[in-house]
Amino acid sequence: MRGYILIILLPLFFNFSCSPPEKNVSNDKKNNELVSLEFIRKDKQERISRDGQKIIPSPEIQKENKELSTLELGSEIEHKIKEILDAKQIDLNLIDDSFQGNLIYPKALKKSELLSQGLKLWTDGDQLEVVTKIDFLSSIRAISKVFDKGINIKTVDVLQNGQTIKSRHLVDFLSYNREAHAVWQCEWIKSIGEGLKLFSLIREDFNEIATERDKLFEDQTEKILGNNPNFDIQFNQSISSWAGQITRVGDLAMTGHNGLSIGDANGDGRDDFYVCEAGSLPNRLYLQQEDGTAIDVSAESGLDWYEDSRSSLFVDLDNDGDQDLVVATIAMIVFCENNGEGVFRARGGFPNAQYPFSMSASDYDLDGMLDIYVCVYGEGDIESNSRGFGDRIPVPFHSASNGGNNVLIKNHGEFRFSDATQETGLNYQNNRWSFAASWEDFDKDGDPDLYVANDFGSNSMYRNDGGVFVDIAKDLGIDDPGAGMSVSWGDLNNDANFDLYVGNMFSSAGLRISAVDSFASHQDKSVVTAMRYFAEGNSLFIGESKKFEIWPKDFPVSMGRWSWSSGFADLNNDGWEDLVVSNGYITGWREKPDL
């Protein structure tokens, strides 16, 4: 029924097709590599249909790897901990009678001097007194009263030695306006017939945060967008829901790599936003109103395309004072001119950046025109219509160089653009499955430098030397060879030097698996170390004068989970920049979203 309603509301389907640049350019002026775009009207039935085919995992994926039994052991331990922490029905048999350890909740908390507006922070004030089983159980009941919204457990290390098992855990305690974080070192005894029993628990790094306010943040999505007819039909639906309604030719990506951009589309002084959607779903432009709500003007603006779109940027490309729009579609980079009132006209598409992910804008050569850098993840094969992992896999996993080629698109003015990648030196180390890039003049010489986060291997830090770039990431110690997915610049310590935060992947399961001796035993030790780094989380580099200090891979800075996006922002207006991390991933197939 939802698909039928969508067909009624969305009568047009736009699809981009391109011809070779030399035959079909958007104008005959020099230095322009854009091709013209053809908008095609499709019949309604071609847009949304049901595909009854099931995707069956290959035998290789289904095959169980017996050597990595630490994964099952870690899951069993997490299950046991959750049973132990169930204050309503504590199973005494899960804790050994000879238990000795620390209280889960400290008797004394030390108030920190570093407080922000509206926030209070306490750290562990106990002397870590060793207690018995009875006192330990009392501590479980006490903490359940303070943190009534649940406890999250992440097991980051498991080491088995005969019948003794040692494990390390990251623990989050949650309540309405309070949370706490700790690291636990546990020891377990495994015996025949009785299974696992907790023998010891050592509490580390306990800290508690509370807010004086009723709420720090509140979800306003429905209040702002709920009056739009497409809110329930499209905006509020999950990928799982759409996957059962859209055919494979519709370009719906299950990973959901579709971004949004914020800008003043119609020049009224208020921020609007453009949402990029997966193939077969229309992109949406929402204009902010005086009362703070936003209305959908996608069709009126000329931007309700159905082409799979990965990212977009509001930027003034022609220096006429309004925000134009650049959209990275699966086929090409589309440049749209704003008439100043929020109506856009596609001026052409750059075809040599297929399968793009993110974009960033800067005037790299200081000619007064904003240029566009495009991260191309895996460029794919035009003939076979495959891309990303469907076309190839990263090889080698820890240092791949067979991804798509990133592109620097130079702006010549009057909507003329050309590929400047090679002439500027940005073709070096340029095919590493790049997710994101960010510009900043880190060395303060007056021109913007570029950091690129790569998904499978070392990142790049391109220093701008008068419009020519040199990769100096390794020299600075910021090549960060992990699963780079986001990057942001800021100044955490207010010393006027730029700091760098790179979003990677934190995986407790990955840390456990890669710690066992049998993990990748056929590989060189340096390769195993590099692969383990992929699970260690985000990286923070503190800027100094033309160099960086590497912040220890410690919690909570590194534990951003699967960090698709990250950024510096002063959330509480206290003059100090905070860190915001957007994370999550598909953990299973469910009718309702699981993240």
Image (cartoon, rainbow, N blue to C red):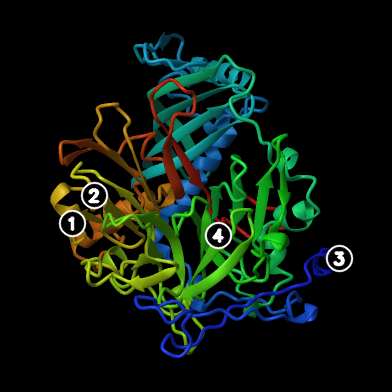
Q: Position of residue 379 (x, y in %)?
A: 41, 76
Q: Hey, what amino acid is under mark 2?
A: Asp
Find out whether the residues at labels 3 and 2 contact each other: C-beta distance under 8 Å. Answer: no
Write down the quadrant of residue 560 in the picture: top left
Q: Hey, what amino acid is under mark 1?
A: Gly
Helix, strand or loop for disc 2: loop
Q: Hey, what amino acid is under mark 4?
A: Asn
Q: Distance between the residues labelled 2 and 1?
A: 7 Å
Q: Which of 445 and 58 is in front in this view?
A: 445
Q: Where is residue 421 in the image (x, y as percent from the top left)?
A: 28, 69
Q: How far apart are marks 1 and 4 (CA)?
A: 34 Å
Q: Nearer the viewer, residue 232 or 28?
A: 28
Looking at the image, is mark 1 or mark 3 nearer the viewer? 1
Residue receiving disc 3: 1
Q: How far apart are marks 4 and 3 (CA)?
A: 25 Å
Q: Hey, what amino acid is under mark 3?
A: Met
**Is residue 560 among the parts visible in the rendering?**
no
Helix, strand or loop for disc 4: loop
Looking at the image, is mark 1 or mark 4 nearer the viewer? 1
Residue receiving disc 1: 466
